[in-house]
Amino acid sequence: MRFDGWPVSSHLWLVILIGFLVFSVSVWRHGDRAPDAEAIGVVQHAVALHQNFTFGYAKSESAATKPSMFLPPLQSTVIAGVMSLDQNLAQSLQCHAWASQDKATTTCATAYRPFFLVQALILSLVPFFAWLMAWQLSGKKAIAWSSVVLVLLSGRQAYYVTSFSDNVFILPLFAALLFTLVVTLQSRYWLWIIATGLVCGLLALTQPIFAWIFYALLVMLSYWRATDGQNSRYFWQTAAQLVVPYLLVTGPWMWRNYWAFDTTALTDGYIASMLAERLAWNVMNGLELAVSFVWWLGGIGPDLASAAYPQEAWQRLDPAAAGGIHASVTEYSRQTLIAAGSLKNHLSYLLDAELWPGIGKHLSVTLAFIWRGLWVGGIWSLLAVPLAIAFTAVSISRRRTDITMPMSTCGLMLLMFAFVSADLPANSDIYIPMISVLVAMLAGEWFRHNQITDGQEPV
């Protein structure tokens, strides 16, 4: 039997296997990688949940755990679940949670390889959903496999295998969201609308900014369904099919927060902390702002900028610079928290004292961050991103809603991340499956056109 004649299920199992094997190389090479400083909060919450069945934190190993709602719950909960199955992992994380970084590297065991293999399996869902999405959009397995190859060539998923980053969960969940959107727009089947709501709920429990994209999709999909069906009742029907599963996923967490903290918010202080790190970048001067469009050009930007401009134009953009903006972000966040007086007032202080008075500068820097967010995957993006944008333009002219709405979702996330977050390019890694699918489809059309031009039977 020809490879193309295999059933879809066989292809999907092979995608999972290949993804797992590729990502497992990172486990073999970096399996002793301990949690970095940014992950310690997540680790401490996971340890507290594992030991005391309380989602919160403690000031020291011997102190009592206090309930918290600063962090979203999904990642820490999954880690705690794996800890209950792997005592070596539990002991390693319990040591790293409270030891200083210097002490941790010398005295704590690093029994992380089994856990990292689990993460490799989770991340293999990214090429899995890319394959499904490409096959759903094109109907061709060759294009689906080309999408998988492009996803793996980006190299970005492998980076997170041996980390304690929330992107381990965000990347496959966002890829799943894009796939459910595609199928919903093609089939109009209510079960896929429900699946979209469920995935949005899981994303919101991983990073609360995804709650905003749920609200956007709630309006977009409901309006599209009402317009498509030429009946206003479809608007409310679709809205209910999205809201109910979303609340089924997020509702227990919101009820927990209402019971413990008298609020139904998903987190408290997390968005403010994210925004503070973004506002710290508004100190860029005009020259730095202009040069940033060169510096942040995928892969080759720093070399081009350092060759073309004086050091003072780009030095503070360098992540390795001691006096750079990267190094000042944490201190800026701390100072604004002190000025706000409490974590509860942090967001309102940032909005009233920092964002709105300097909204013009913030929007200017946001444009630079949008540019920065486009070039995901380094050199890979220099070819892939322009081709994906070109195919999106073609899809708009063809009225391919099943392509333009998922791409609009990516565009909305790009705008939101650029406005409130400085964690780029990590946040932009979610666009890789969609970009890969569009590039593969464009290549497929080019190949088919050449066959027709040459008088051959198109494949």
Image: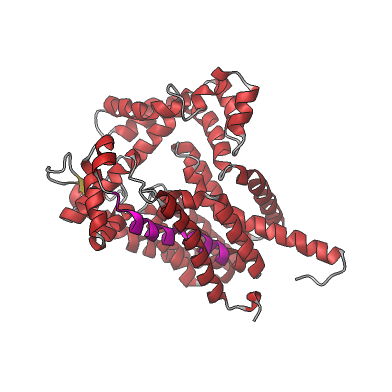
Asked if residue 458 is positioned above or below residue 373 in the image, the reply reads below
Pinpoint residue 390: horizontal percent, then vertical percent. Answer: 70, 50
Residue in view at x 50 percent, y 58 percent: 22
Pinpoint residue 387: horizontal percent, then vertical percent. Answer: 68, 50
Question: Left or right of 357: which side holds 410?
Answer: right
Corner quadrant of residue 229? bottom right
Query: In the rendered structure, which segment of residues is drawn in magenta?
Result: 110-132
Corner quadrant of residue 115? bottom left
| Res. 391 visible in picture | yes
Viewer-nearest residue: 360 or 61: 61
Quadrant in which the C terminus appears: bottom right
Question: Left or right of 225: which side holds 353?
Answer: left
Residue in view at x 70 percent, y 57 percent: 442
Asked if residue 326 is positioned above or below residue 130 in the image, the reply reads above
Residue in view at x 30 percent, y 59 percent: 251
Viewer-nearest residue: 179 or 297: 297
Corner quadrant of residue 300? top right
Quadrant in which the N terminus appears: bottom right
Q: Is residue 127 magenta?
A: yes
Q: Is residue 279 magenta?
A: no
Color style of the picture: secondary structure
- Report the predominant secondary structure element of the magenta stretch: helix
Viewer-nearest residue: 446 or 148: 148
Residue in view at x 61 percent, y 30 percent: 303
| Res. 404 visible in picture | no
Pinpoint residue 114: horizontal percent, then vertical percent. Answer: 34, 59
Question: Left or right of 456: which side holds 192?
Answer: left
Pinpoint residue 432: horizontal percent, then vertical percent. Answer: 55, 52
